[in-house]
Image (spheres, rainbow, N blue to C red):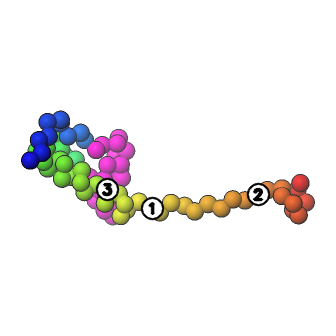
Amino acid sequence: MTTHTAPVPSPCTNICRMNPATGWCSGCWRTLSEIAAWSTMADDDKRHIWSLLPERRKANEAPPVQHRRVVVGGPGTGNS
């Protein structure tokens, strides 16, 4: 049995924008009800919420933008 003695910190990132499509905050990935109940929630419930956040983030963040390198003034461009 694992004993947790440290308080469970809030996942709040101070980026408080609710996404109407998911119902989750774009900063911490919690629902409004999870945010509102956090201060009175049992530590086991807080840890459960924490366990859900990585999957929520992964499923809803945009994929990284692929960049390609553009060389300006290279050979054959007349700009060298």
Amino acid on which disc 1 is placed:
Ala
Sequence-wise, the earlier of marks 2 and 1 is: 1
Q: Give the left or right position of residue 22, taking residue 2 as reference.
A: right
Sequence-wise, the earlier of marks 2 and 3 is: 3
Amino acid on which disc 3 is placed:
Pro
Question: Is residue 26 depicted above or below 12 in this figure?
Answer: below
Magenta stretch: helix, strand or loop mostly: loop
Of residues 4 and 71, the one drawn nearer to the viewer in this rendering? 4
Report which residue position mark 2 lands on: 71
In the rendered structure, are the residues bearing label 2 and label 1 in contact, judged by CB atoms less than 8 Å apart? no
Report which residue position mark 1 lands on: 62
* CA distance for labels 2 and 1: 27 Å
Question: Is residue 52 depicted above or below 47 in this figure?
Answer: below
Amino acid on which disc 2 is placed:
Val
Location of residue 79 in the rendering, given as x and y in whole percent from the top left corner: 88, 56
In the rendered structure, are the residues bearing label 3 and label 1 in contact, judged by CB atoms less than 8 Å apart? no
Report which residue position mark 3 lands on: 54
Location of residue 72 in the rendering, given as x and y in whole percent from the top left corner: 79, 56
